[in-house]
Structures are given as C-alpha cells and as structure tokens.
Amino acid sequence: MTSLTLDCYHHLQDLVKALESGEYKQCYNRLRVGDCYCVMGVACDLYDSSRWIDRCGTKFYSYKQDDDEYPEAYVANCPMYVAEYFGFTNPQLSMLTQLNDNYKYTFKEIAEWIKRNVIRSESEIYKD
C-alpha cells in the first residue's frame, strides 16, 4: 500500500464531500457532459474548474492539459496531474472509472469505495 501525503488526504476528503453532497449530477463514459460529471470529472472540477472547454458547442467538455509543450492541448480523459493531486494510483484510477462507467455506482457509493480503499486511515498518511 502506498502512503498518502497530507495534501492528498485533504484533497480526497474534499472529493468525498463533493461526491456525497448531491451538488454534482452524474454522467457516464465522459468527464463532463453539460452540467453532468463522471467521478473523475468531479475531481477535475475540484482541481480547477476554469480548465473546461466545450470546443465544438456540443456540451461534451474537454479538460485543459497541463503541458507547456502543447499549451492548447485538451483531453477527454482525466489528466495524470489531476489523479496525482488526489494521490490516486493507476489501478485506483482505473477502478474508479469502472465503478462509474461500467458498474454505474452512484457518487455516494463511489465516495464509500474511496474511503475504504484509498483514504483508509490517517495513520497511513505520509507526514513529511
């Protein structure tokens, strides 16, 4: 198991709170469609809500890539820098996507999964 940093722990707490709040409507197979989000779309929105763009006017939003080499690059999936901000490993990121898109877990169910499988306990937080 990988230890979380204290910052990641707090970011995860914010994500869980947002998922449980009912403030976000859920969608599947896209980060964001109109005012609906998948679980990683909520994470992107919390990271920086100003990075969304509806490039074609279709309400299928893309998210600004954090890349100096390609300053106008946008992606349709969760950028790794957002996953790292929350401390998600690649397997956790993959599982969250599956829970949302394939298994159709509600945001509250996904929040519970995060609490049980990612946050676990404060004793596992890397304090440096």
Image (tube, rainbow, N blue to C red):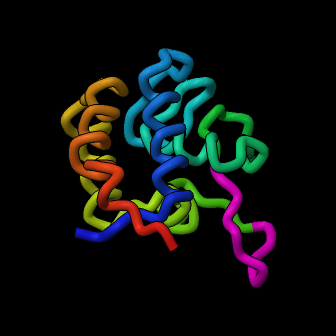
Give the side of residue 108 with respect to residue 16, left or right.
left
From what the image shows, is residue 40 above or below residue 73? above
Q: Residue drawn at (71%, 75%), measured in percent from left and top?
A: 67
In the displayed structure image, the side of residue 63 where residue 32 appears, left or right: left
Q: How many marks?
A: 0
Q: Is residue 70 magenta?
A: yes
- 1 is higher (above) or lower (below) than 96: below
Which residue is the extreme one toward the top? 22
Comparing 55 with 116, the one in front is: 116
> Looking at the image, which is closer to me, 108 or 104?
108
Rendering coords of residue 31 (x, y %): 51, 43
Q: Nearer the viewer, residue 114 or 123?
A: 123
Q: Residue at x 78, y 44 (%)?
A: 50
Main secondary structure type of the part rendered in magenta: loop
Q: Nearer the viewer, residue 65 or 88?
A: 88
Q: Is residue 98 left or right of residue 22?
A: left
Q: Quadrant of the N terminus?
A: bottom left
- How far across and down, in percent of the image, does residue 115 sit? 30, 40
Residue 82 drawn at (x, y percent): 56, 59
Can residue 81 be found in the magenta stretch?
Answer: no
Magenta range is: 62-72
Residue drawn at (39%, 41%), measured in percent from left and top?
Answer: 29
Name the residue: 43% across, 34% down.
Answer: 16
x, y percent for residue 39: 43, 39
